[in-house]
Image (spheres, rainbow, N blue to C red):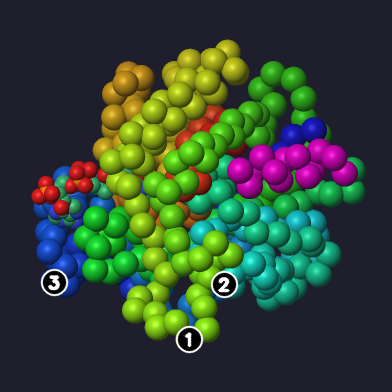
Amino acid sequence: MATIIIATGRAVPSRRVGNSELAQQIDTSDEWIRSHTGIGARHIAGGETACSDLALEAARAALSMAIQGGMIREKTLEELALTVDMIILASTTADYIGTPSTACIVQDKLGARNAGAMDLTAACSGFIYGLEIAAGLLAVAAERRRILVIGSEVLSRITNWNDRGTCILFGDGAGAVLVEKTAGEGPGRRGLLRTILGADGSGAEDLIIRRGGSRNPYRAGETVDEPPHVEMNGRGIYTFAVKRATETIERLLQAEGITINDVDRIVPHQANARIVATAGKRLGIPEEKFFLNIEEYANTSAASIPIALDELNRKGELREGSLIMTIGFGGGLTYGGNLIRW
Ligand code: COA
């Protein structure tokens, strides 16, 4: 059995906020942001747009690609949506806390009436976790065939726009992939070949939204000065990210018995171009091997890898047989990577 990504999609809000626009509101500069992060802009959702809206748009784009590509029998979006068995939605910025899941909202609006639906919280590693969970769900039930894995974020809603240490980093967006189970064994087989998933909860406080959950709920009568927002230990995350990204690349290569030369492209979580450059340098990997679009979108957490995959796919850079590695790290703390034969 193989789990193959048959289509990709993305949704990015049209409002683009360049570094210079941010520099008019806080004490920063285009030069500082570019030199410390590689970020040039971010896209910000309008006030009415929630996580499920971007997720739905990305999911529809993926389903449309599958139909237009002619790789499936179904001819309309409605028909195809009915064949989806599960929707896994990774996010840190769900429409609601706890219930309903954002995945259920997408399931309804997409008309995926035969699908189960669930949210996944693994911060920026969410998509990597989601792909492996999808492969597992397809493996354990013969009748399951298609799963949508979505990463969607409206990080602008949990950003403290007065904190120059964090607000420059984040953006909004969603990416989705449609995976399908096919027969496939032996050398050269396509699909998800291997995944590493890890966590280090001792770093929980390094990236945290303190208010609003059951630990620190808002209480009746309380005056709230500011909306819940993410707090970050930038240095701590940086060190963790470089270490875990480096290790995960090495472990994936070792486990598959391959070298970096066998990998066509590494699609890293787009958190900071310097994290990627440092990890690459430590392992002697040429910079061109990594696909980076952080300059345009900033860090979109769980959405960053599927957005990048869709961009590469639509450019025709993911050909059948290409070996793609994803690498991610983020809040939790979590980390991981997938090796995918496209
Ligand atoms: N503009 C201008 N100056 C800024 C700034 C900004 N946006 N943000 C911070 N600074 C200043 C600091 O105040 C500090 O000034 P000081 O020396 O006078 O105190 C100086 O720049 C250095 O700050 P520091 O926090 O040490 O910078 P850094 O080189 O570590 O870069 C990050 C900060 C956030 C870019 C970096 O730590 C990072 O990317 N960490 C990982 C974050 C991440 O990826 N989070 C998401 C996880 S998925």
Residue 24 got which mark? 3
Q: Answer whether residue 309 is visible to the viewer in this image.
A: no
Based on the displayed image, in which of its 4 quarters is residue 276 positioned? Answer: top left
Magenta extent: 129-141
Disc 3 crowd rating (10 Å Cα; few below 14, some 14-19, many 20+) is few
Task: Return the x and y of residue 89 as percentages of the image width and height.
Answer: 62, 58
Based on the displayed image, in which of its 4 quarters is residue 254 positioned? Answer: top right
Disc 1 CB within 8 Å of nearest ligand 1 atom:
no
Based on the displayed image, in which of its 4 quarters is residue 134 positioned? Answer: top right
| Residue placed most toward the observer, 266 or 212 | 212
Label 1 sits on a secondary structure element that is: loop
Q: Nearer the viewer, mark 2 or mark 1?
A: 1
Badge 3 amino acid: Gln
Residue drawn at the location 32% of the way across and 47% of the way down: 233
Residue drawn at the location 33% of the way across and 27% of the way down: 280
Mark 3 or 1, nearer chain start: 3
Badge 2 amino acid: Asp
Residue drawn at the location 20% of the way across and 67% of the way down: 22
Disc 2 crowd rating (10 Å Cα; few below 14, some 14-19, many 20+) is many
Q: Quadrant of the C terminus?
A: top right
Q: Which residue is mark 1?
A: 221
Verify CB contact (< 8 Å) between mark 3 and mark 1: no
Image position of 342 (left or right of 147) = left
Residue 95 got which mark? 2
| Residue placed most toward the observer, 307 or 7 | 307
Task: Return the x and y of residue 90 as percentages of the image width and height.
Answer: 58, 55
